Image (cartoon, rainbow, N blue to C red):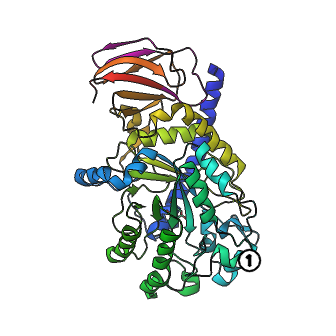
């Protein structure tokens, strides 16, 4: 890449990052509010002056609990996988963000809630849902081409509509739509063929279709007047049983927004999962203890976080399809985020929102495939890789900028990141220079190569912990370049 091209790529990445930062801030506020059921900062009443402290990206746990997460044999595949495909698909793909001619603000799959659509109206979407272009093979192939090792799809989102054949509720794709097929069955077959772990998202608490499910106050009144246990007993638990028994071994169940969930209620789900599928993971949003932790949506911690965790993230600004959200993150940003997350110890669960006809929007497909090509060359530095031994590359607390609470803002640096494997150090370079200098190297570097050109040994010199590597004049590709260092005595 020429210096001019690099400059303009860098500029366009920065511009799009800045533009997206504003929307992301709004999205984070809305989704945090969605999970915990309180008003986001922008929705505060005017007489409430105090700004709540920013929520941390992730809940930290004790070193003992982090070690427990890491040593859990059930999560071995997940710790190695690092990168998964999230799919939010359901009836909300039909309105696609617009209801009765009005664009409804917020995330697409929340349209029923945001527009306060009565069940009697919303449920009529089922009669129109006929995704004849849905092709499980294509979706699973996309995940594979993208280098994603697991696929997590909404078996039932908050709108209460099941994307699978259910005996528990007729409000499901096989019984209530002209489509009649069971996409989850088809995905089971397509994923198994490709060795992709199939995982199901299931909204255990919010169910806006059910009088006693959490969340639908416009049809059914306040949540605290509901018989939530009746809803769990008659729908959420038996449907969880169905997804655990109808689709072969699952990688995980991804529960979400644990409103009204108590330890005791969560325990009923945990017990069922453990009994029916002892190897199936439980994510961190059930309401009790899961096998790992989720960060807030689109929240990447600033530093290494010990333990097992995952960042659920959007590729534009919605999970469910919205016809007018075209602000796709470019491949350079997705690669950066993937590397950043892996270098800090997490997994990246990146979402696409298929349209109502069953097609995944082409721009998102293009981005995923581009990142997949990068992973074909550089996957060695991602899959099963450990955290950075450094930390200085993440950035630092600002000396001038403060947040609303008066705390210094973290200024993220984006030049490079590091991941590790036994005897190997991988330096992911996001900007190019002819010489790369690294301080604080432990052990002795014996060889330096680029994953993109592994046969060519690079010249380097090491003095104590300071390493200087001579790089080629030009970066070998458009996206990050990975420098592979073989190191003795670093572990
Ligand atoms: O309310 C949901 C939202 O619709 C989406 O499913 C995300 C994905 O992490 N989870 C909740 C908000 O955090």
| Foreground residue among 8 and 155 | 155
Q: Which residues are magenta?
A: 458-482
Location of residue 178 (image quadrant): bottom right
Residue 343 in view in this figure: yes
Residue 169, compared with residue 468, is above or below; it is below
Residue 33's spot in the image, x, y percent?
A: 48, 66
Above/below status of 434 relative to 170: above
Percent across and percent down for residue 212 are 50, 85
- Looking at the image, which residue is at 33% across and 22% down? 487
28 or 373: nearer the viewer: 373
Split into 4 quadrants, where in the image is the N terminus? top right
Q: Residue at x 43, y 73 (%)?
A: 259
Tell me the residue at 40%/38% (across/down).
Answer: 385
Q: Is mark 1 within 8 Å of ligand 1?
A: no
**Residue 274 lies in the magenta-colored region:** no
59 left or right, relative to 209: left
Q: Which residue is mark 1?
A: 127
Q: Residues within 10 Å of mark 1 (few under 14, many from 20)?
A: some
Q: Which of the 4 quarters of the picture holds residue 58?
A: bottom left
């Amino acid at each position: 890449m020429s210096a001019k091209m690099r400059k303009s790529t860098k500029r366009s990445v920065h511009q799009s990052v800045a533009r997206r930062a504003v929307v992301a801030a709004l999205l984070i506020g809305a989704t945090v509010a969605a999970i915990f059921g309180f008003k986001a900062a922008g929705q505060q009443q005017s007489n409430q002056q105090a700004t709540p402290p920013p929520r941390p990206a992730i809940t930290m746990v004790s070193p003992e609990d982090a070690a427990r997460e890491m040593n859990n044999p059930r999560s071995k595949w997940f710790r190695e996988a690092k990168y998964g495909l999230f799919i939010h698909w359901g009836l909300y793909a039909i309105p696609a963000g617009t209801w009765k001619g009005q664009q409804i603000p917020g995330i697409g799959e929340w349209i029923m809630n945001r527009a306060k659509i009565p069940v009697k109206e919303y449920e009529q979407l089922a009669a129109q849902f006929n995704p004849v272009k849905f092709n499980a093979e294509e979706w699973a192939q996309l995940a594979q081409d993208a280098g994603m090792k697991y696929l997590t799809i909404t078996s039932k989102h908050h709108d209460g509509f099941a994307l699978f054949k259910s005996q528990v509720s007729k409000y499901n794709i096989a019984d209530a739509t002209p489509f009649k097929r069971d996409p989850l069955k088809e995905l089971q077959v397509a994923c198994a063929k490709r060795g992709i772990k199939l995982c199901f998202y299931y909204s255990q608490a919010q169910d806006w279709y059910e009088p006693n499910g959490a969340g639908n106050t416009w049809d059914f009144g306040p949540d605290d007047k509901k018989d939530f246990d009746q809803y769990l007993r008659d729908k959420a638990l038996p449907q969880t049983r169905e997804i655990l028994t109808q689709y072969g071994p699952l990688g995980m169940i991804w529960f979400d927004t644990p409103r009204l969930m108590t330890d005791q209620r969560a325990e009923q789900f945990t017990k069922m999962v453990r009994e029916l599928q002892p190897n199936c993971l439980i994510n961190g949003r059930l309401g009790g203890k899961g096998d790992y932790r989720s960060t807030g949506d689109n929240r990447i911690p600033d530093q290494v976080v010990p333990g097992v965790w995952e960042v659920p993230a959007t590729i534009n600004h919605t999970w469910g399809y919205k016809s007018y959200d075209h602000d796709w993150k470019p491949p350079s940003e997705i690669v950066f985020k993937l590397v950043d997350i892996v270098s800090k110890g997490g997994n990246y669960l990146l979402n696409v929102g298929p349209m109502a006809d069953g097609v995944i929007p082409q721009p998102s497909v293009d981005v995923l495939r581009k990142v997949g090509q990068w992973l074909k060359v550089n996957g060695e530095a991602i899959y099963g890789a450990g955290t950075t031994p450094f930390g200085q590359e993440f950035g630092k607390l600002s000396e001038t900028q403060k947040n609303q609470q008066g705390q210094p803002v973290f200024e993220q640096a984006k030049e490079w990141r590091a991941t590790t494997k036994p005897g190997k150090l991988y330096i992911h370079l996001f900007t190019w220079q002819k010489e790369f200098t690294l301080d604080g190297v432990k052990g002795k570097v014996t060889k330096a190569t680029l994953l993109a050109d592994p046969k060519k040994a690079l010249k380097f010199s090491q003095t104590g912990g300071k390493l200087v590597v001579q790089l080629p004049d030009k970066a070998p590709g458009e996206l990050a370049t990975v420098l592979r260092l073989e190191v003795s005595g670093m572990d």
